[in-house]
Amino acid sequence: MAENYYRKLKRLLLDAGCTFVRRNASSHETWFSPTTGKHFTVPDPCKRRHTANGILKDAGIKHKL
């Protein structure tokens, strides 16, 4: 079974100062990054490491899972 990266991802986002904006109709959330000044989506569950790393990049976080 694939690992769920959502909890690790959420912790990294919060530690970087990103803020949760809203839960969308599907299983996705919208977040805001003060580093990049942009909104981005986070799936729950996030089962692919490549997706999690892409989200971190969108948030301006230089960390890899």
Image: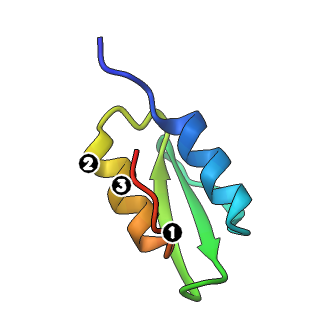
The residue lying at 61 percent from left, 52 percent from top is 12
To which residue does mark 1 refer?
61
> Given the image, on which type of amino acid does mark 2 rest?
His
Disc 1 to disc 2, how far (Cα)? 14 Å
Instruction: Give the mark toward the camera: 1 or 2.
Output: 1
On the image, the x and y values in percent for residue 21 come to: 70, 65
> Given the image, on which type of amino acid does mark 1 rest?
Ile
Q: Image check: 48 left or right of 52?
A: left
On the image, the x and y values in percent for residue 42 come to: 48, 53
Q: Image check: 36 left or right of 23?
A: left
Q: Image check: 51 left or right of 32?
A: left
Give the numbered dot on residue 53.
3
Which image quadrant is residue 34 in?
bottom right
On the image, the x and y values in percent for residue 20 come to: 70, 60
Task: Please determine whether, in this image, residue 5 is positioned above or below residue 19.
Answer: above
Disc 2 to disc 3, how far (Cα)? 5 Å
**How many neighbours does mark 3 have within 10 angstroms: few (below 14), some (14-19), or many (20 or more)?**
some
To which residue does mark 2 refer?
50
Q: Quadrant of the N terminus?
A: top left
> Given the image, on which type of amino acid does mark 3 rest?
Asn
The residue lying at 60 percent from left, 84 percent from top is 35
